[in-house]
Amino acid sequence: MSDPLTPTPQTTSPMRITVIGTGYLGATHAVCMALLGHSVLGVDVDPTKIEALANGQVPFFEPGLPQKLREALDSGRLRFTTDLDLAAEFGDVHFICVGTPQSAGSDAANMRYVDEAFTELAQRITRRALLVGKSTVPIGTAERLTERVQRVSPAGTELELAWNPEFLREGFAVADTLAPDRLVFGVDSDWARQQLAAVYQPILATGTPLVVADLATSELVKVAANSFLATKISFINAMAEVCEATGADVGLLATALSHDTRIGGRFLQPGLGFGGGCLPKDIRAFAHRADELGVGQAVAFLREVDSINIRRRRRTVDLVREMADDDLAGKRIAALGAAFKPNSDDVRDAPALDVARMLYLEGATVTVYDPEANGNAHLVYPDLNYADGLIEAVTGADVVVLLTEWQEFRDLDPADLGRLVKHRRVVDGRHALDVDNYRANGWEVRSLGRPNHPVSNAVAQG
Ligand SMILES: NC(=O)c1ccc[n+]([C@@H]2O[C@H](COP(=O)([O-])OP(=O)(O)OC[C@H]3O[C@@H](n4cnc5c(N)ncnc54)[C@H](O)[C@@H]3O)[C@@H](O)[C@H]2O)c1
């Protein structure tokens, strides 16, 4: 197979596609659809975002996407607009990629944006077309919206609806879109399946597995996948809690478990846990929806998965406080990381920022440094200090706490770092540092789920 990230626009049936909502998911999808050879119109209600994209600027950090956006714009197959009338007129297949954040004061997904996008587009469509939901939604949404869009659209039942859940990971969005592990088509008719097969033809031609399903199953696939991943992360973090009470070492435990091929090591790294714009809100919305459907007990464990995850944040604060002589007031804390994970500038429900905020609320002077997310973090928590570079963040620090495992932080030289801080004390919230090397350079190191004086890695591996 040729490089999946530089596909030749080989589609045998170029289509006219719109992508409604050009955030992390939609902007990537629009670019990639154009790279596959389709004519694409990206639409958003935010004119600043549309102007940036039209000028070749990606309004968020995603490795590789700026180059792909430029390629797609240069091909002449990708345009952006805020004009929904134009979109309704232009598209044969419309992908809806708007947000489904958690509702204020409830675990339910806020469906306002999805409902509006489907309804307003449907009202403008006058001919046969396919509306394809990509947003992550509660089960039953597609069925509910099918009735609604066919009622409000001049096209009536000529307007069909499908669901095509998206599994891309921020940080790998282009690769995951162009070379996904699998495609899922939730469809009600063979015509809808054919439309989606035509859109994805170059990807299917590479042998990508395809699951064709009913609408409800396609909605469930996405929340089930995220629930499984969240559960695996919280499982190892629950073991970390047991380790903390017994002197066992969760790092060694995870390594031993990961050698079992039935378990595997992915999503089994102990640490500060998950966050971001998907996993936390998706498992909460799923549990909420299951309650509504009368099957809440089946996924009641997801509430525990959520609680374990949140408890890791508080525990990280405890470790920092212990290192700061049991009192955070007036202490200088260098918080390394703000994004919910490396290679992203996304701070939605970011564990790192939550920890930084809790440290600040206990009276610490917190200086945050993230290679890409300082700007977004500042918008959410303007009270924290933000450093332009690592040196500024750590200079004079009483405790350094690693919160997001950027490569820049993994690569730090503990000897160099030691010359900048006030005390050589570090909390490794992500099990990302070479503990032996830090200790050899005079650092006190604490990590979640590991004893204060663990067996050295060398002995453990031997
Ligand atoms: N970000 C990811 O990694 C990812 C991965 C898989 C699935 N998802 C799901 O995809 C959906 C979108 O997520 P996101 O991270 O891209 O969100 P986002 O907030 O980055 O983007 C949503 C965009 O939709 C726009 N919008 C809102 N209402 C609109 C309307 N009526 N018409 C046109 N545009 C409108 C917003 O202005 C915004 O630009 C969510 O349901 C999310 O759960 C996200």
Image: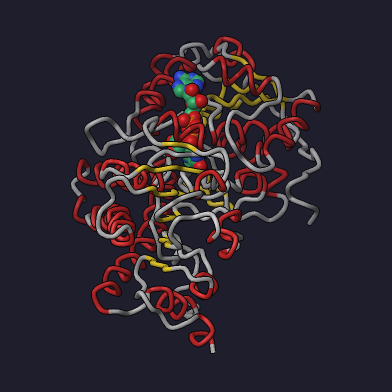
Q: Is residue 133 visible?
A: no
Q: Nearer the viewer, residue 128 or 446?
A: 446
Q: Is residue 347 above or below residue 152?
A: below
Direction from residue 443 to residue 207 in the image, left or right = right
State the residue at coordinates (50%, 15%): 155
Q: Quadrant of residue 358?
A: top left
Q: Picture coordinates of residue 79 (x, y %)?
A: 69, 20
Image colouring: secondary structure
Which residue is rendered at x = 26% and y = 30% of the image?
Answer: 104
Examine the rendered structure and indicate whether residue 167 appears above or below residue 249. above
Return the x and y of residue 122 as percentages of the image width and height.
47, 17
Q: Residue furthest bottom?
A: 462
Q: Is residue 395 above or below residue 231?
A: above
Of residues 409 and 174, the one nearer the viewer is 409
One can see residue 57 in this view: yes
User: In the image, 130: left or right of 6?
Assistant: left
x and y, in percent, of residue 12 in the image: 78, 37
> Which image quarter holds the C terminus?
bottom right
- If the image is split into quadrants, where does the N terminus sit? bottom right
Residue under the point 37% across and 45% down: 356
| Residue 139 in which image quadrant | top left
Q: Residue at x 42, y 20 (%)?
A: 149
Residue 26 picture location, percent across and down:
56, 31
